[in-house]
Image: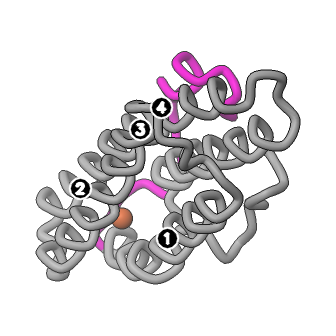
Amino acid sequence: MGTFIPWTDQICIGIQEIDEQHKQLVELINRLYDAMTQGADRQQAATEILQELMQYTIVHFAVEESLFRIFDYPDYETHRERHQQLRDQVIDINKRVQAGERLITPELLFFLRKWITSHIMVEDKAYGPFLLAKGIEKNWRRTSWLGRIWPGARR
Ligand SMILES: [Fe+2]
């Protein structure tokens, strides 16, 4: 795990399936930071990571929204609207970067850090106790598919 956004209890929901996905998002932003500060071809590497961040954000939000529907989460609509805003932001940034705009700057990194951590700490933390009370598994009992796709993922 990188150091730009350290993984702490503050951003931990307490449901392993979700926490591991959040770790992937955090790690992608950490990788973006590393690419920006250390890489040889910084803009190129950062452009690729940003594309991955956008794709994984879409997947992750879809997973959360489907859990909310399955468990009939009362704040579904509000959370989904928030996802829509966050998704639009990362899609827009990615589109502009892929089109050649040199947007990958320290300001963008600070923006993304806040973009992910405040959502996890506020909106996502709110659904943790609800899903646990509904009987969702706190811990994995089986090997995750995440590690196969992202070799850095903990299993
Ligand atoms: Fe969320």
**Residue underneath mark 1:** 120
The reply to whether the magenta stretch includes residue 149 is: yes
Instruction: Find ligand 1 in the image and state its quadrant.
Output: bottom left
How far apart marks 3 and 4 lie (CA) works out to 6 Å
Q: Residue at x 30, y 43 (%)?
A: 58
**Residue underneath mark 2:** 67
Asked if disc 2 and disc 3 are in contact, CB closer than 8 Å, the reply is: no
How far apart marks 4 and 1 lie (CA) works out to 19 Å
Quadrant containing the N terminus in the rendered view:
top right
**Residue underneath mark 3:** 56
Q: Residue at x 75, y 23 (%)?
A: 41
How far apart marks 2 and 1 lie (CA) works out to 16 Å
**Residue underneath mark 4:** 52
At mark 2, the secondary structure is helix
- First in sequence: mark 2 or mark 1? 2
- Counting from the top left corner in percent of width and height, residue 115 is at 50, 68
Q: Is residue 155 visible?
A: no
- First in sequence: mark 3 or mark 1? 3
Asked if disc 3 and disc 4 are in contact, CB closer than 8 Å, the reply is: yes
The part of the chain drawn in magenta is 134-155
Label 1 beta carbon less than 8 Å to ligand 1: yes
The reply to whether the magenta stretch includes residue 76 is: no
Q: Nearer the viewer, residue 147 or 25?
A: 25
Display colour scheme: one colour
Instruction: Report the amino acid beneath label 1.
Output: Ile
